[in-house]
Image (cartoon, rainbow, N blue to C red):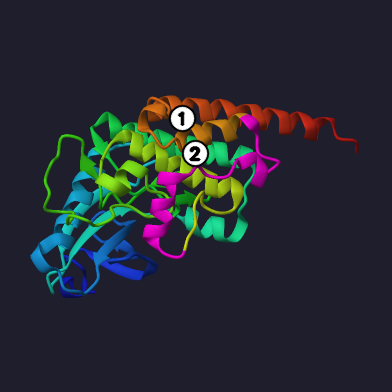
């Protein structure tokens, strides 16, 4: 195959692995390093003011800084012959958490705790570099064949000190309505606490089978969290572990100061809960009659 048939003169696109709001993800082959990769390629659409290109560049810069087993690594960026940017990432064999929840939710407390621990660890690594994800949701988590979650899509990410207003237009909801923090929905506030709220909303969905708030449209869903708290998890998911349910509700506190302090401590607590639940399950299986 000639280099003219390769993306960037190097990457062979094998098949479509997924679609996003503004890009298509391909399973691809790096002909230089002879390895499988994933390539996120901007779809053909108008890009007034270069906003989409800027988000692509921001995503690549943010993910390239974070080296962590629960974050999808970025290896390269480039531009196609028709001027569309692309990002070259690790290929993770698995499926998105969104697909997993659509097929299997509600999940067990043990499984939710273990998945949450991995996502929280990814957020801790990002926050340690002053990077806030701003769009933590099931579609942005890939769960591999071993059940390990990998956070991806830092297209809305912002460094905590970054005050550039050019990427997000005023009045535009940043993040996804089902999972966005109240202060982020109202003011666009980017903080680790907002990411932790979104993590809580994702875990609530996984445990209850639906997000903490629903509604007729995105803004109705986002606005509900200003006036009310989500339904008690133990009421909608009676089998939920009490400690896990309490932690998720703490993450979903409307006031950021009432949420857990940082992602690292949340990961540790989730790991402890998951280990306890696993030990209890294993002991029960061992003692079960033949």
Left or right of 279 on screen, residue 197: left
Question: Is residue 191 one of those drawn in magenta?
Answer: no
Left or right of 189 on screen, residue 238: right
Is 111 or 135 nearer to us in this picture? 135
Q: Is residue 134 visible?
A: no
Tell me whether circle 2 and circle 1 mark residues in contact (CB < 8 Å): yes
The secondary element bearing badge 1 is classed as helix
Q: Quadrant of residue 184?
A: top left
Left or right of 54 on screen, residue 69: right
Q: Quadrant of residue 62?
A: top left
Question: Residue extending furthest left?
Answer: 49
Disc 1 marks which residue?
267
Question: Is residue 227 one of those drawn in magenta?
Answer: yes
Is 162 or 71 nearer to us in this picture? 162
Question: Which label sits on residue 116?
Answer: 2
Q: Residue at x 57, y 31 (%)?
A: 246
Figure quadrant of the N terminus: bottom left
Question: Residue extending furthest right?
Answer: 290
Magenta stretch bounds: 216-242
Count of marks overlaid on the render: 2
């Amino acid at each position: 195959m000639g280099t003219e048939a390769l993306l960037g003169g190097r990457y062979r696109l094998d098949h479509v692995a997924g679609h996003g709001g503004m890009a298509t993800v391909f399973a691809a082959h790096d002909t230089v390093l002879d390895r499988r990769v994933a390539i996120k390629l901007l779809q053909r659409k108008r890009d007034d003011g270069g906003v989409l290109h800027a988000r692509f560049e921001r995503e690549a810069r943010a993910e390239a800084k974070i080296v962590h087993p629960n974050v999808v690594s970025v290896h390269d960026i480039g531009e196609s012959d028709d001027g569309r940017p692309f990002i070259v990432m690790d290929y993770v064999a698995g499926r998105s958490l969104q697909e997993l929840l659509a097929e299997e939710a509600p999940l067990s407390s043990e499984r939710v705790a273990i998945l949450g621990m991995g996502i929280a660890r990814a957020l801790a690594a990002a926050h340690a570099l002053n990077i806030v994800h701003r769009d933590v949701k099931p579609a942005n988590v890939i769960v591999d064949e071993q059940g390990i979650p990998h956070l991806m899509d830092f297209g809305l990410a912002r460094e905590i000190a970054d005050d550039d207003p050019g990427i997000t237009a005023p009045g535009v909801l940043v993040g996804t309505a089902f999972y966005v923090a109240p202060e982020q929905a109202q003011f666009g506030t980017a903080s680790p606490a907002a990411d932790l709220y979104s993590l809580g909303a994702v875990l609530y969905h996984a445990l209850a089978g639906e997000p903490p708030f629903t509604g007729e449209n995105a803004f109705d869903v986002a606005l509900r969290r200003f006036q009310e708290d989500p339904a008690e998890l133990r009421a909608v998911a009676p089998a939920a572990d009490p400690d896990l349910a309490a932690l998720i509700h703490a993450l979903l506190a409307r006031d950021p100061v009432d949420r857990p302090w940082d992602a690292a401590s949340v990961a540790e607590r989730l790991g402890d809960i998951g280990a306890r639940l696993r030990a209890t399950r294993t002991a029960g299986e061992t003692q079960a009659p033949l």
